[in-house]
Image (cartoon, rainbow, N blue to C red):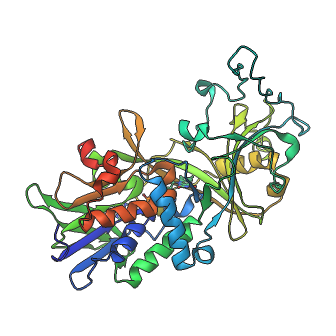
Amino acid sequence: MNAQRKRNIVIVGGGIIGSSTAYYISRHPRFNPALHTVTLLEATSIAAGASGKAGGLLALWAYPTCLVPLSYALHRDLAAKHNGAERWGYRRLGCGSLAATVSKNGIETRAPKPPSPPADNGTNGELPIQSTVPDEKTKDWEKLPKQDGNAAGLLQDSPLPPDLDWIDGRLIQHYEEMGSPGATETAQVHPFYFTNAMADLAREKGVDIRLRAKVTKINDTKTAGVHSVAYEDRDTGKTHTIGDVTDVIVAAGPWTGKLVPRTKVEGLRAHSVVFEADVSPYAVFTDIQLPTDYIPEHRASQGQKRRHKGNVDPEIYARPFGEVYACGEPDKTIPLPATADEVSTDESQCDDLIAYIGTISPALASAPVKARQACYLPQHIRFGEQRGPLIGPTSVPGLWVAAGHTCWGIQNGPGTGYLMAGMIFGDGVEEEVGSLDPRKFKV
Ligand SMILES: Cc1cc2nc3c(=O)[nH]c(=O)nc-3n(C[C@H](O)[C@H](O)[C@H](O)COP(=O)(O)OP(=O)(O)OC[C@H]3O[C@@H](n4cnc5c(N)ncnc54)[C@H](O)[C@@H]3O)c2cc1C
C-alpha cells in the first residue's frame, strides 16, 4: 500500500479503540499531515461508553492471546512515555480470586477447601473437589467472562495477602493469586483518563476530533469502496457529509453492529459503582455465599424480595486516585439505546452490588459511593456464541473494523490501535491477528 498517496481517514467512535487508533495513526513514522487527514467522529463525548465506565484491569493472562502480550507491553511503554502513572493512574497491582461465606451473624460457615492429597494415595493426586460454585443452570447472575479456562488454570494457592486489609479475612475460605507464581502479571489504568489522554495526544498531532457527531451512514460502492461518511451534528440536528474518504475505521463498540450489521457486534448492559476509598492496590474476583434468606436493606425496607440465589460474584478493583471500582453481572433487560448518553442505570442493581460488597468489606460498607452507572459491553456474537474482537479490513475496500473487545477492551486497546495503524500504512501486520480478520467472518 502506498503510504505517500493522499489519505482521508475517518474513525468512528471515541472509545478506547477509536482513540488509541487515532493516537497510533498520528504517531506512525509514515504519517504525513500534508498528505493524511484523520477525523474522529464521536456521537457523545470521549469515553462516554464502556471505555469510561470499565474497571481498567490489564492482565497478561487475558485473551485473545494473539493480542494480549503486545497490548500489555504497549500500556507499559505509553505510561513511560507520557507520564501515565500521574496522567491516567497506570500502576501494577495484585490480583486474586476469593471465596467468602457470609452467615447471619457475619462469620463463615462454608467448609474450608480440602487439603491437597498426599502424592502416593493411589489417586494420582486427584481428589473429588467440593465445588462451592452453584450450578450454572440455577444461577440467575452471569459472570462477565474475564476468567476463561486458561486464566483459571493459572490460579495458584496462596494465603490472603496481609495488606489486603479491606476485606474481612474471617469470611474467606480460599484466596488464590491470579497469574504465574511470584510474577506480576496484572496492572491497571483509569480507563476514562487513559482514553481521554489518547484522544488529546492524537489531537496534538493534528487529528480532527468532532464530538456530538453521530455517524448515520457510511457510503460505498462495491467496486471503488468507501467514499463518504454522513453524520448528524447532535447540537444543531444538521447532517454533514465528509467526502473523498479513502478509509473508514469503525470502532463504535457495541454500536458497531448498528452501522455495519454483518459484523454482528452488539451490546450487553452491565452496572458498576465507584467508592471513594484509598485502599491497598488489589483487584479481586469474588464468590460470595450469602445466607439464603439475605435481603439487602434497601430491598427489605421496601418489602421487596431478594434478587440473588445465594451466590454473588462482584469484581472489585482498588483504583488509583483514591477510588474502588466494582462491577456486577450483565443483564439483558434494556436493549442498546441510540447513544451512550441515553444508557439507563437501574439504581436497584447498583444498590444490590453495594450491599453485597458491604457484607465482606467493612471499609467499603462505610465508604461514600461517588458513581452508580451502567454501560454496554461490546460483544461479537456468532451462532449464539461470543467470539473474539474483529480487527482489520473488510470485504469493502477502505472499510475497516476494530470492535467487539468484550471485557478486555481496556487491556487490548493500545494493541488494537497499533495494529490498525500498521494495517492502514501497509506494515503487513495483518497476520499477527489473522484469526480476528473480519473477512473470515464474511464482514
Ligand atoms: C462493567 C465492565 C467492566 C469492564 N472492565 C474492564 C477491565 O477491567 N479491563 C478491560 O480490559 N476491559 C474491561 N471492560 C471492557 C471494555 O470496557 C470494553 O471492551 C471497551 O471499553 C470497548 O471499547 P470501544 O472503544 O470498542 O467501545 P466504547 O467504549 O463503547 O466506545 C464506542 C464509542 O463509539 C461511539 N459511537 C457509537 N456509535 C457511534 C456513531 N454512530 N457515530 C459516532 N460515534 C459512535 C460511542 O459514543 C462510544 O463513545 C469492561 C466492560 C464493562 C462493561
Where is residue 440, by image quadrant? top left
Compared to residue 399, the image places residue 235 above or below, namely below
Relative image position of residue 127 (x, y in whole percent):
72, 19
Please tell me which residue lies in front, 309 or 97.
Answer: 97
Q: Is residue 234 visible?
A: no
Where is residue 2, by image quadrant? bottom left
Relative image position of residue 49 (x, y in whole percent):
49, 61
Relative image position of residue 262 (x, y in whole percent):
27, 46
Where is residue 285, by image quadrant? top right
Q: Which residue does the image show at 38% across and 40% down from the upper left?
A: 381
- Horizontal arrangement in the rendering, residue 420 relative to residue 413 (left or right): left
Q: Which residue does the image show at 52% across and 66% down from the upper left?
A: 75
Q: In the image as oriented, which residue stretches furthest toward the top?
A: 122
Q: In the image as oriented, which residue stretches furthest toward the front?
A: 120
Q: Which residue does the image show at 80% across and 51% down from the upper left?
A: 161
Please tell me which residue lies in front, 434 or 208.
Answer: 434
Compared to residue 247, the image places residue 55 above or below, namely above
